[in-house]
Image (cartoon, rainbow, N blue to C red):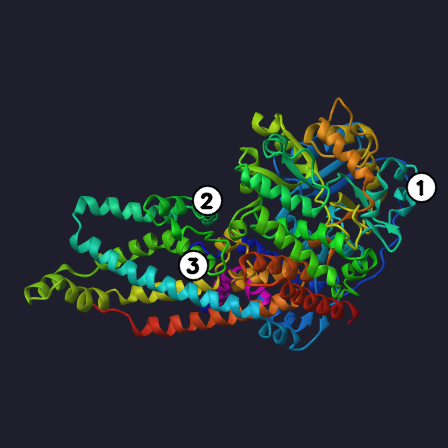
Amino acid sequence: MKNRFGRRAMVAGVALSALMLAACGSGSGDSPAPTANLSSPATKSGTLTVLTKFADPKYAPYFVAEAKAYEAANPGVTVDLQQVGDQPYKDKIRVLSAANQLPDVYFSWAGDFANKFVRAGAAADLTSVIAPDTEWGKTLAPAALKAFAYDGKYYGVPIDLDGKYLAYNTAAFTKAGISAPPATLEELLGDCDKLKAAGYEPIAFGNQYGWPAIHYITQLNMYNVPVDTLNKDYNPASGQFTDAGYVKAIQQFQQLISRCSNTSAANGLSHEAAQANLLSGKAAMQYIESLEFTALTKDGGASPVIANNWSFFRLPAAAGSAGDTNALTGAPDGFLVNSNSQNAALAVDFLKFLTSQQSAQKIVKDLGWLSPVAGSATDSNAYPQLQATLADMGKASQFAIWLDTVTEASVADAYLSGIEGLLSGSKTPEQVMQGVQAAAKQAAANQSS
Amino acid sequence: MRTVMQRWRLTVWVLPAVVLLLVFVYYPVVENVRLSFFSWNAFSRRPRFVGLKNYELMFGDQVFWTALVNNVLYAVISLVFQVGFALVLASLLEQFVHQRLRGWLRTIYFIPATISITVAGILFSFIYNPQIGLLNRLLEAVGLGQFAHAWLGDQSTAMFSIIAMSQWQSIGYTTVLLVVAIQRIPRELFEAARIDGAGAWRVFRNVTVPLVREMTTLLIILTISGAFLVFNEVMVMTAGGPDNATQVLGTWLYQKAFLQDQMGYASAVGTVIFVITFAIAIIQILISRRRRVQW
């Protein structure tokens, strides 16, 4: 029992205490963001604080190098770069926000996570410098900019592009007698049967922590629910989730997993552990993010079993779907500028540097990420599948932003736990949606009060 | 005059500790209770008074009760293994095991307690892995493959799997504490009991158990209060899932505060945890006064 209330609990406790102190100390209330001066600084000097969630040793060196490069190009500027992990970032940024101590530049996921900062007046309105018709905005993919738009204004600077695809082992498909990727969900289900007969696990699927299933639901919601309804429901103030398409999306997911994967083991298996089956050639497909594609390449450490034999396709929609069948699950990650920053102009200058052609090409080469900067993926820095991904993203009508970040947090949680229950067999699709509807109702009530 | 000066000096020396305690312990506790009557989050800096609404929401929330039941389950199972079983184990070690082997066994039992809870959690996540996990492989190897399972992925087994890991880690620690307590009992008492014809069970029941009661009381209190503060192992192994089946009060508080932005609700959960652990601490003080062993 000893050490039970250990470091993590201590961190949470200290964080909560800090929040309490912050809540007690501040009484200003919500206020619209003050207009930050974003015009180019006359002299570039001072210290710029930057907080990212890229502490992962695979990603951190890139941002450190970029910060140093910016300092070298601007001798009067010091970049105070802090990087924390994905999960701790969610705690840290909330504590800093409550304490009115946000850094000049900070990371944000697209969707309601970013919108919270906007509604709290903590994100600077960057429309004048980054809207699609501005000089800077023209260099960035419009869909990526739109992901950080709120009420017609632009608040975020996209740093990467991420889309969700079914990556597949082409050799397995050939062995199973499948000549082309499926065009509909029904065809995909038929292909799963063929792959099983050929001795493969059709789709590797691990749902420990819930989010992998949510990515399927994000895409299937987009296919089955009219876009206007979806936009209304994803807004915390008006969410109802009563459209029949939501239940249909969950039913399709249930059918897909039960026929193409192992439902009973899913909740106990991590996404990464499931990926090992694709990498070893035991599984034929996995629904993964384009940011993960590097793991399938020789440079990413994959064995020739998969490195020489992989491609990807979008999760196909069922025939006759009522929603947008050309939308793609995914979103850019990005940075926001603190609206109260004294260095807002310098922050914008730093972000322009980070999204310059040179930096964008480096991010593609070093990290294998796609950049929203036009023309950043070339033959010299991107492998063929990555270039094909970029081309496919260009064809998508819109990004379907991850369901667990685009919706209000309690709605996202109802989806996460509900789908886990569905996979465990304790909930039906209808019961999952009842939970989501109740959470949406509560969220709407909170918004109005 | 000199006495007054001495008192003032003493007060000055104690004052920093008192101030720290007030600022970092008592103020947050009181402030937590106050904030549990408000609706607030990290993004809207204007707490709105809602009276008992957060408590109403919390007590009407099925997940809160699941979390509370899980904490109770944790406490009960931990008591059985970390106090009951550990006492039997300590007694066996002291009475029947050869001196040289005893030291080895104590060390072996204690090793898990030296491993970080996070590392142990990750280790057991691998052991419980439904595809490559040691546990399922072991079951298959001994012909019990039908019991192979997604231990952390099934709502009916996930909580017990986490608790089992915790017992594995903690039993050695409590056993060593109880061994020390048994060693403090004068040898003559054991010898006298044996001369009087008492068997091993009788000696255990009538000599060992009553004379280590100070330690068992302490362990009972620590085990129960620890069970209501459990957090790390759940976060590492399941993060409260699947479908909230492994939520405990600590993880539910964390989720409400830092993932769902419902700080008022989280403060209410914090208040419940405080009330429970405070009550346990009071009971500890009262019982430990009464159960002191006099030699």
On what subunit does the disc labeled 2 rest? B
Residue B160 is labelled as 3
Q: Secondary structure at mark 1?
A: loop
- Identify the secondary structure beneath mark 2: helix
Query: Looking at this view, is A30 or B8 the one in front?
Result: A30
Under mark 3, the amino acid is Phe
Tell me, yes or no, if residue A320 can be seen here. Answer: yes
Structural crowding at the residue carrying mark 3, measured as other residues with C-alpha within 10 Å and reported as few (<14), some (14–19) or many (≥20): some
Q: Is residue A306 above or below residue B179?
A: above
Q: Quadrant of residue B161?
A: bottom left
Q: Earlier in the sequence, mark 3 or mark 2?
A: 2
Whether residue A363 is visible, yes or no, is no
* Quarter where residue A375 is shown: top right
Is B154 on the left-hand or right-hand side of B98? right
At which x and y percent is residue A397?
A: 83, 45
Q: Residue at x 47, y 57 (%)?
A: B158
Instruction: Say which of A126 and B135 sits in front.
Output: B135
Instruction: Please give the range of residues in magenta.
Output: B4-28
Does the magenta stretch mainly form a helix, a strand or a loop? helix
Residue contact at pointers 3 and 2, CB within 8 angstroms: no
Image spot of residue B125 (x, y percent): 47, 47
